[in-house]
Amino acid sequence: MKLLRLTPALKSTSAPYNQFSLGFKETIDQTLFSLNAHHDVEIDKKISVSHSNGSIVKAFFTLKKLIQINKYDIVHIHNGLTGVIFLIAILPFNARLLNKTVFTLHNSWHVLKSRNKFLDLLVMIFSKSVCACGQSSYDSIPNVVKFLIGKKIISVSNGFDHERIDRVEKKRGTIEHFSSTKLKIVCVGVLNNTKNQIALLKVLKKTQINAEVVFLGDGINKQKLINFSKSISRSVDISFKGLVSRDIAIEHMLEADLFISLSKGEGLPIAVLEAMYAGCFLILSSIPPHIEVSPPRDRCNFVQLANNDEVIQSLNNVISNLREIKMGRHKSKEYAITNFSINNMLQTYMKVYESLKK
């Protein structure tokens, strides 16, 4: 099977690369096209890569050439913009590829900007098959959009690669990413309004807990968050480490006591799945995607975003029960594998691919 995969940016946190391309590297001949260059991730040699260095015009001609010289069985689109460029590039002589096109909606609909909703909708209408990355993502799609798409949309639950986490754990040795013996907290995600890191900082400003908090990720709110963090009690050590490789993020999860996400919206968050398997206790905002993950009750607290007292109480509960929490790191592993194994996700997508290949 020969597959063309389209994504806007190839980063160390990229699901199209980490979950999909790496997951299928042994079974599918893949070409991964990225609108932007890939400076922060080393691509597996079994995967062909092409990019247009941020140029939409170059993307059009690059895709047109790829389509002309390759006979792709499947085209998998992971983003509305690259999808629209692809739709234009296949005209007029390769429109047959529409019957071999899969689109994955990687987020909840309400989280998308208006422009991205429009672009995603266009691609969803013309794609042969549409997959939402979990039931919450599927449920978030407005009825009018579902009416336009018809019956070709399905829910496919995200999966995480537990074998990768096992490999990272075996090779990390004595590496330590936290510098203190305080409560170790890790937060992973783009630093923006949706991921809502400011909510955690505002809670920390109201407490006097002894903790070390590490933020992994980059984004438009980085300087704002750094500035705000300076007003927080010195009993809380806060660091912003920027965008790191997936393996480094996993190393932090394996070391941390607590993973916190007070996000306002998600698809089905891979980082939460990884942190759950890595043994972190979880404090999660009670949004549908987090509830869909539904970690074991004794390994997670759900909190209302509008209620700072709930977050503070959850933090205090973790501190009061930290010894038991550390001893129970293994409790979520079997649940995570059973319900969110990447193998389950890949098997479902392979069935989708095979149905379009006929």
Image (cartoon, rainbow, N blue to C red):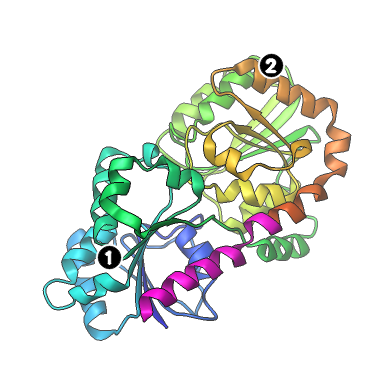
Residue beneath disc 2: 207
Q: Is residue 350 above or below residue 294?
A: below
Which is nearer the N-term, disc 2 or disc 1?
Answer: 1
Picture quadrant where residue 241 is located: top right
Residue at x-position 46% and y-position 77%? 47
Q: Residue 46 or 30: which is nearer the viewer?
A: 30
Q: Residue 296 or 42: which is nearer the viewer?
A: 296
Q: Is residue 215 visible?
A: no
- Tell me which segment is drawn in magenta: 338-358
Q: Percent position (x, y) of residue 220?
A: 40, 36
Total labels drawn: 2
Name the side, left or right, on which 225 lies relative to 320: left
Q: Secondary structure at mark 2?
A: loop
Query: Dot 1 surroundings within 10 Å: few (below 14), some, or many (20 or more)?
Result: some
Name the side, left or right, on which 259 lies relative to 108: right
Residue beneath disc 1: 52
Q: Is residue 283 above or below residue 42?
A: above
Residue at x-position 55% and y-position 52%? 244
